[in-house]
Amino acid sequence: MLFSWGFSRIGRNSFNGLCRCLLLRRMDAHQLFVSSIYSQSLSESTQKILGCRDFFSWGLPPVFNGYRHQIHHQSSSIVEEPLDPFSLVSDELSLIADRLRDMVVAEVPKLASAAEYFFKIGVEGKRFRPTVLLLMSTALNVTVPEPPTQLREALSMELRARQQCIAEVTEMIHVASLLHDDVLDDADTRRGVGSLNCVMGNKLAVLAGDFLLSRACVALASLRNTEVVSLLSTVVEHLVTGETMQMTTTSDQRCSMEYYIQKTYFKTASLISNSCKAIAILAGHTAEVAMLAFEYGKNLGLAFQLIDDVLDFMGTSASLGKGSLSDIRHGIITAPILFAMEEFPQLRAVVEQGFDNPANVELALDYLGRSHGIHRTRELATKHANLAASAIESLPESEDEDVRRSRRALLDLTHIVITRTK
């Protein structure tokens, strides 16, 4: 049994120093956004969508009124001061970023340049998944009968190192999936810069993604935990399954909300949900607690993607780091259009014709603007955010200050996800 008692007793400054020491001393086997202000100017497509309805403004829709109060009311036992979830783990995030850059070094210069493309300083992205996993690690700290001091500290450092490894593996799998997706989608940009396939070509982009997956597998194997290895291996299978579902839909599947949610889980939510579960398993928690961690990750991931779908219609290319309307222009039908189709059945005929013709894109946007599609997608995202918050509230009670603070940060992340603008 691995224990994490020591970390529940370490203050933040001491903890950050320990993190530095920990990663610097790890052996090879174990080494390893907050919301922006809404844009003042809307894209033409956004104005078209939002200008058609007076129920919605460029602020948050009525469904969000009192949302933060709802989460904080549920978690009244947790300190109420405002938290920036990312700042709580900023030192660890920096160390993990450095470690990732070391892990993707390759002997072939071209492959090395390709593999490190999205790990370079300035284009690492929001590091959302590592943040969630590091917070979950602390949120699941448990107090156990005191072993001898030296043993307690050694066990605590070992557990944290293994949980950090999960964060590293998760980020490598995520970036590998982005590289492969950009090839499949023929994308031009990613994270505000040229996509790797655009800069270095499709072949090298695919190989770089494969290389990252291989490095993730090596790191995962070092944990020597078959259940965790199985979980993260299943994630890779889900990524492939979800992408295949998106590429090979029938007409009925393309217009099915149930099919869309299943595909979204495979493509987006499986990674964070199974990684959260892996964090709990490494800490020696019960199946019930591991499932709560899984539910948090699953519902947070679904909420994240639903808001991504909204932003694809409402954001600008600059704010999103990719071209707006990219999904619909690639013929990918997402929640806002599916909801609009329920109000305007004639929209299905437009969807079935495809969107190679720009006139069909404009027609679909017109129907979307006259519908509640954007609003209902936000509502669905809020529902999943609330389910994620409920999972955190259901965890075994703890009086430990660090545990409570991390749980509060995980709750705040559910709010950040549904109110973000990029």
Image: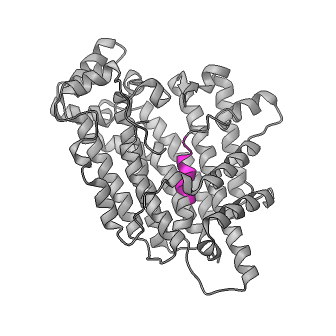
Residue 243 x %, y %:
48, 36
- Residue farthest toward the right in the current orientation of the protein: 107
Residue at x 35% of width, y 40% of height: 260
Specify how the rendered protein is coloured.
Answer: one colour
Residue 346, visible in the rendered structure? yes
Picture quadrant of residue 29: bottom right
Residue at x 24% of width, y 18% of height: 363
Residue 265 x %, y %:
42, 47
Residue at x 79% of width, y 37% of height: 106
Residue at x 24% of width, y 33% of height: 57
Picture quadrant of residue 250: top left
Secondary structure predominantly adopted by residues drawn in magenta? helix
Q: Is residue 38 magenta?
A: no
Residue 59 x %, y %:
28, 37
Magenta extent: 126-134
The front one of 164 and 230 is 164
Compared to 78, does 99 lie above or below?
A: above
Residue 395 x %, y %:
43, 71
